[in-house]
Image (tube, helix red, strand yellow):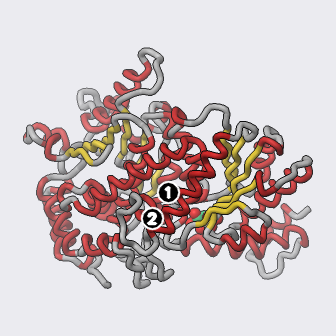
Amino acid sequence: MTRPRCDQTAAWGALGQHFESKGGRLDLREAFRSDADRFEALSQQAPHVFADLSKNLVDTATQALLLDMARECRLEDHRDAMFAGEPINNTEQRAVKHWLLRVPKGASRDADAAEVHATLDAMLAYAEQVRGDTAITDIVNIGIGGSDLGPQMAVAALAEFVLPGKRFHFVSNVDGHELAGVLRQLQPQSTLFLIASKTFTTIETMTNARSARAWFEGQGGTDVARHFAALTTNVAAAREFGIATTFGFWDWVGGRYSMWSAIGLPIAIAIGAAGFRQLLAGAHEMDRHFATAPLASNLPVRLGLLDLWYRNFHGFTSRSIAPYHSALRRLPAYLQQLEMESNGKRVDAQGGLLSMATSPVLWGEPGTNGQHAYFQMLHQGTDVVPVEFIAVKQALHDLPGHHSQLLANVLAQAQALMSGKATEGGHKHFPGNRPSTFFLLERLDPSSLGALLALYEHRVFVSGSLWGINSFDQWGVELGKVLAKDIAPRLDSGDVSGLDASTAGLLRRLYR
Ligand code: F6P
């Protein structure tokens, strides 16, 4: 199915004209003054997530043209093709069905649904068994990228729901300092290693897994079957490695979309089977919203359209994620992989060179920390960086005063970015009119986290779809892997033949 790319639509040209004529000069303060309903019109309640888009640089005409563009690009057809299980990951000839992992039992006619639920039931039964096994105190997830960031982010985010008495460690880097630091805290008889790798070939993960097993045996550990489990699509390779307990998943789950699969086992051990099912259910509610809501009131669609407006017309190069909840501290890193690995592409799905910019840089830290570090640049720097605030209404601690301070700060930052301060010139001048989106969760729990993450997934789908790219492959990670394979033996031999002068010079310095 070839669909028009955004830059091939009539709306694209109209958006360019609108940007030049007035859409690019919208003043938020003026927009609020002239439209008493702006907040109502530009905010919406989606499942578990309230979103205020009113502090964004859009007017009615911009929104109408963006929606025209989505229609011309046949965004809904593409979305429906994903939910129908068509092989929309065309460069790998794969379907894209991470959403199927979240469909309740019996609610899908998809051919893989029964297997999904059989695996989920088995994995959750295992999670409950580990939770009940008081001899196991430490769970070590060894994985990288999508086999690390999701579980690590979610276990931190749901800390208030984590079973006391279990400690969770995440080892991803091939840098042995990381694994060595974790191993120092462990006893083999009380440790469970989860080797998480979709392919079971990733060099970092395999190196760490081999070292973990050597440490386990070296420390007198016995019963590898009890102390190691594998989460992978390549069950045969895991068995060959010597791991008997395996939980599989499928090639139609992309690595960065895999925390809903067996890769989520650390989350399930941490928050229990019921909690994991709530996480899936929250995401499923957002899936249904994305699949069924009209474009104009479809939150992932509205966000994805805004992303194009900012990237391709305003030319903003980055977006800052500011979760005002310390438990969401790994969310920016998780979203970096989700968005930048999905949409950091320079050719369309057919391989044609793109003439417009794609993925922005995503970055951020939890508030209020960021305020005392880089917010200076957000308020007074030369670049405009749209900010995404994520606030949570209810606190799950009872320390007095903290939560109202936190909420006052997140509101104040969004307000300051927009309002600015014109009364004083020079160093004390705040230009204002700096855009932000404000997400509000009632509380941070498994269901709302699931919904928030699915919202981001679908928003990335929307922008990728309009850009005409395949958001589900990642060829750009391959070259470095191949070159590292060539360089590794040279560090032992000192052979620099055929290398460029810089790499050769550095290698000579590193050669022992
Ligand atoms: O190198 C990138 C990547 O393939 C990611 O897409 C993936 O999440 C990560 O490596 C880990 O891959 P695996 O789960 O196969 O070990």
Q: Quadrant of residue 159?
A: top right
* Alpha carbon distance from label 1 to label 2: 7 Å
Q: In this view, does 262 lie above or below 414?
A: below
How packed mark 1 is, by other alpha carbons closer than 10 Å (few <14, some 14-19, many 20 or more), is many
Q: Name the residue under label 2.
A: 98
Task: Please provide percent x and percent y for residue 25.
Answer: 19, 52
Q: Quick one: SS at disc 2?
A: helix
Task: Please provide percent x and percent y for residue 14.
Answer: 15, 69
Q: Give the residue at the far top of this rendering.
A: 400
Q: Mark 1 points at which residue?
A: 260
Task: Please provide percent x and percent y for residue 38.
Answer: 13, 42
Looking at the rendering, the quadrant in which ligand 1 lies is: bottom right
Which of the image's four quarters has the C terminus? bottom right
* x 90%, y 47%: residue: 219
Closest to the observer, 127 or 203: 127
- Amino acid found under the numbered disc labelled 1: Trp
Q: In which quarter of the image is residue 286?
A: bottom left
* x 24%, y 75%: residue: 73
Please give the label number shown on residue 295: none
Closest to the observer, 337 or 188: 188
- C-beta proximity under 8 Å, tags 1 and 2: yes
